[in-house]
Image: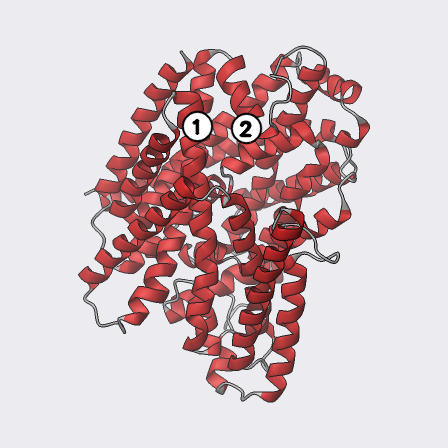
Amino acid sequence: MERRMSLIEKTFGRLTPIKGAAWIFVFILFVLFYIFFFVSSPALMLYLVVLTLPPIWIATIIGGTLEMAKIFKRRLK
Amino acid sequence: MTAAYAWAFALGLFVLFTWLGIKFSRVENTGDFLLMGRSVGFWLFFGAYTGAAIGGASVAGFTGYGWSQGYSAMWLIAVSGITVPAFAFFFAKKINVFGRKHGAYTLSDFLARRFGEEIRIPTSLISYLRPVFISGLQFLALGLVFQVGFGLNLKLGILLGAGVVLLYTITGGQLSAITSQWFQSVIQGGGMLLFLYLVVKYNGGISSSVHRMYSVLPSHMLSAWSMDLSILSLWIISMGLFYLVDPWLFQWAYMARSAQTSFDALVAVSLSSPWGAISFLGGMLLSAAARSGVLSFPAGISPDQVYLHFISKIIPPAAGGFLLVAFLMTVMSCASSFLMTGATLLFNDVIEKSLKNTLSEGRKILLSRVSVLITAVLGVASALWIPFLIPLWIMGQALAIAGLLVPVGAAWFWRRATPRAALYSLASGASVAFLWSLVAWWKRGDPNGFVLGLHAVHAGLAVSLLAMVLASLITPRASEEMERATLWREIPWSEE
């Protein structure tokens, strides 16, 4: 029998713990960005940027490197 | 000394990108060359998109905005930070599914499926202007970076920058462009973090930076709400709503490995907004440092020059060299992305369709490469010989919104819209926006100016909407298959 998917699963796909945590992080960052912007707080925005962008940058490097490695393996045989 | 470090970094990276282009030059078909075989994974998409979305204007330009206007200028990124995720939520999956089902490459493919082939060329023409002018602007920015940071002549800098970008895109196509964009994005991110670290350091650390901002900057520079409402309404349309019909964004949605990847990556790139915030905050902190006498800038310096002056004249040479190269990468990633979008539009909508699909796959790939070359040549020509490239880019953007928003919206949601009405809507919206821009340019000296209290986009959109509704009531409808082809509720959320 076909399993009914929840709205969350339809939208975000199968959520592993890591993927779920990543979405929560993105959501919190998104909300805080707009709160700090709308309440006109460059100070809080500065702290937000300083604390969150380095891990995003590192995640981009790690995730991208793994994907690039697969592409290189496939294309550069 | 800064230039010597920058040359060393830059030459190494140019060799890497050229190597990638050559290594990836063996492509099997045009889908491979233009859309990377619809196989872009999440991290590559996320990194490359961030690299491509943040161009030269987003670094030097936004730093200048922070320097001169302060916090309220961040509306520029705040509006797109909402509309791009909204686009992802509602459309990214469906566009990906549509692209796979119908072999679509461009926004024109989407509209032609719904309203017939007659709408293809006008759509492509409007869509093509923006990538050409943006590529031209990036080539001009490359020339300026080579001039200011590396001591080259401006024209030589434009040709060198465009030559490197062309070399790795014409050989490896989208695969080479996206992998290079990912590398460029990593360096760009590192550069932006280093920039933030340095401006905070020059202000004596984070607490001291915050204190200085609040004690030295005027209050209007610290408020998000000191923005002129007419300018804000324009930004909401041109930097916000535009993304709902952006041909470049459609292409990203088509290229993702799956509908889910398309959604995930496009929602996650809303994180580009905090990246953009670095430039605004950096500009504000530099302004605070200059006002309190900690740093000195030439009197009356143009806001656009603040970033380049800081990295080439104030900070230590090794850091300056790295930041110059990071800025170069920022510009190159944007240039290569829009070059590929322009080439895809030119090949898919004009060249291939005019030759009625009679070509062999080898010939198609060759002509795709020719399309990259033509788009690059047009970009270089506009960088070299058109002194008013920014007004033209603004006009291109206004034409695209005024001409495309209503037809695309109707294709998604209004089954009663007819092919004739879509054509009239597109043509009338774009024409009115074009004429309105010309009048604003003539009367106000700026095509982005307001005439009778309205911007070109406001006027064009109103006419486009009216034409769509009225003409749909009196012209013949399309076939049922065409009406349902692009209907939002008819396209599934996934391929299964």
Q: How many marks?
A: 2
Quadrant in the picture for the C terminus of chain B: bottom left
Q: Amino acid at mark 2?
A: Pro
Q: Residue at x 70, y 19 (%)?
A: B288
Q: Residue at x 59, y 52 (%)?
A: B85
Question: Closer to the observer: label 1 or label 2?
Answer: 1
Secondary structure found at label 2? helix
Disc 1, SS: helix
Using the image, name the chain to which the residue with label 1 belongs. B
- In this picture, is B255 found above or below B152? below
| Quarter of the image with the N terminus of chain B in it | top left
Residue B76, percent across and down? 64, 43
User: Is residue A5 visible in the rendered structure shown here?
Assistant: no
Which one is nearer the viewer's eye here, B462 or B52?
A: B462
Q: What residue is drawn where x is 70% and y is 53%?
A: B450
**Hey, what amino acid is under mark 1?**
Val
Displayed quadrant of residue B149? top left
Closer-to-camera residue (B161/A34): B161
**Residue for badge 1:** B145
For mark 2, what is the residue? Answer: A54
Q: Is residue B22 left or right of residue B489?
A: left
The answer to whether B95 appears left or right of B37 in the picture is right
**B483 horizontally vs A75: left or right:** right
Residue B404 visible somewhere in the drawing: yes
- Callout 1 environment at 10 Å: few (<14), some (14 to 19), or many (20+)? many
